[in-house]
Structure formats: C-alpha cells, structure tokens
Image: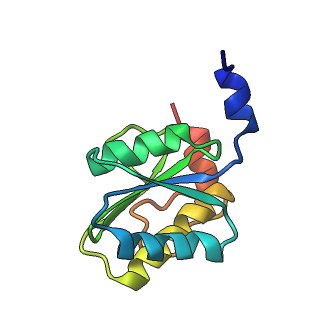
Amino acid sequence: MRDERRDKAAERPTVRVVHRRDALAALREVCAGLEEEGVPFQCEPTDAPLLVAAHEAAVRSRLLVGVAVAGCEACVHFSQLPVDAPVLHVTDASAPVLRLLGQDAARLVKVMPLGTPLSRRAASPKSLKENAP
C-alpha cells in the first residue's frame, strides 16, 4: 500500500501544464517561456474545460501554479484563487503571447511582479498569496 503523502513529498516541485492534444504548438511556446525563466514544469493531457483544468493543475502543483492550453487559448491559475478567477487568460494568442504567458506563470512561482502586459490584475504574485481566501 502506497502512502500518498510520501509520494507527494517525493515529487519534484513543478508547474503543472495540462493541454489538449490539438495544442502541441501552443504548448511548446508556453513551456519555452517557463524554461526561459528557469522554472521546472510537467506536462500532461486533459479533456477538462480550460479554467477547471488550469485550477486543478494548480491545486496538484507543489508550486501552487497551473497552466492549461487548448488550441490558441491558455490560462494561468493560482491554487488559492476561485476557479473562475485565473491570474491570466488569453484567447487567440500568437506564439510570442503564449511564450510571455509561460514567463508570467514562472514569475508567479518566483513571487515576482508579472512582467508582461498580459496580466489583467495589477497585483504582484505576493499580494495574490496574501489576499487568497
């Protein structure tokens, strides 16, 4: 019998990136942004709705940040925010925008202000943690 707590503790801290199977090009760009910032990530497929998938990924991440990618749409979520209130959500995004989204997901992990104009919030990641329910 496996101890789930031990498995979770032994797991490498990563940003969870979930994606639809039709979003491999977009996934590459998001992951490149995370990699440029030096934050480890783990990818896995999903069929869940985008906001739900991003929130579930954040909850499962030891770094408390999850990303979901579907087609040219992507979403960054923080585990302590409500499902319908992601940190970032872009639709019809170009490759450079998706890369910036990945960088901002990494900056959220590193507790740094979001560095791109993608953010719909003026808050820094630190204030998101302080104001979380």
Q: Residue at x 47, y 71 (%)?
A: 30
Q: Position of residue 74 (x, y in %)?
A: 35, 63
Count of number-bearing discs: 0
Q: Is residue 32 left or right of residue 88?
A: right
Q: Is residue 16 left or right of residue 6?
A: left
Q: Position of residue 122 (x, y in %)?
A: 48, 62
Q: Position of residue 80 (x, y in %)?
A: 51, 37
Quarter the N terminus occupies: top right
- Compared to residue 118, the image places residue 8 above or below, namely above
- In the image as oriented, which residue stretches furthest toward the top? 1
Residue 105 seen in the current view: yes
Q: Nearer the viewer, residue 8 or 127?
A: 8
Q: Position of residue 51 (x, y in %)?
A: 32, 48
Q: Identify the coloring.
A: rainbow
- Compared to residue 13, the image places residue 6 above or below, namely above
Q: Residue at x 55, y 76 (%)?
A: 32
Q: Residue at x 40, y 48 (%)?
A: 54
